[in-house]
Image (cartoon, rainbow, N blue to C red):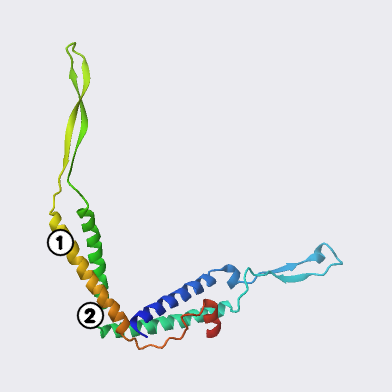
Amino acid sequence: MNLKESYRYANYLEGLTTIAYAYLKKDDFVTTTTQKHMRSKTNSEAQDENITVQKSFDVDFTPNNVIDFIVKLIAEKESLANAIALAKCNAEINIDNAVSMNKRKQAFIHTLKNLANIKASERQIQGSDYKFNTDGNQTKYFYPIIETVAINYDRDDVKGLIKKYSKECDEVSAKLDAIEINTIVDFNPTFDINETFEDAIVAAK
């Protein structure tokens, strides 16, 4: 498989693990409830009966099967992770660093774009104050206020950085896409990625 397929397989294993954990968290799955109907206590002619309460679902595997399945999944995920790490070592660039730096640059681009959208502006608003009139009474009066918003940074520099980092991110993304397709991971998957959880766990029993 190539690196891209290995990532997809890793996600598939993670999905199987999540479902398996969910089963083990269901009391109805990991326990069996038995009711002892002691009819003879109040009716000497009646027979006592033990009844197993029906579960809310019917599956072809047991809690022990699920536990064993998780053990296999953990081993599979560990082997896959080691194979992926080895394949990455042979790539032309450090993939993890490239992905990390691309995320940082994209976050910066987002901030820069917000700055690029800010515009200088001017507007007139109304102010108020008080003064004494000719009768000596305090009265309120209104007056215009010219409010000016100025940009405290170089818009051209901001736009230039957006172009610079966008181009770098695009180039790295294209290179990463090519690496994911062309880098071979020396690993033979145990599970079929197209199988459902139920199919996979029954096949693994």
- Looking at the image, tell me whether mark 1 or mark 2 is earlier in sequence order: 2
Q: In the figure, 143 relative to 50: above or below?
A: above
Task: Tell me, for residue 64, which label it has, or none.
Answer: none
**Residue 154 in the image: x percent, y percent?**
12, 54
Q: Residues within 10 Å of mark 1 (few under 14, many from 20)?
A: few
Q: Residue at x 22, y 73 (%)?
A: 171
* Helix, strand or loop under label 2: loop
**Based on the displayed image, in which of its 4 quarters is residue 2 positioned?**
bottom left
How far apart marks 1 and 2 lie (CA) works out to: 26 Å
In this picture, residue 152 sits left or right of residue 193: left
**Residue 186 in the image: x percent, y percent?**
35, 89
Q: Residue at x 73, y 68 (%)?
A: 36
Q: Residue furthest top?
A: 135
Residue receiving disc 2: 93
Quadrant showing the C terminus: bottom right
In this picture, residue 80 sits left or right of residue 32: left
**Residue 162 in the image: x percent, y percent?**
19, 62
Q: Amino acid at mark 1?
A: Gly
In this picture, residue 44 sits left or right of residue 198: right
- The residue nearer to you, when weighing 175 against 14, is 175
Q: In the figure, 43 relative to 17: above or below?
A: above
Q: Is residue 121 visible?
A: yes
Task: Tell me, for residue 160, which label it has, or none.
Answer: 1
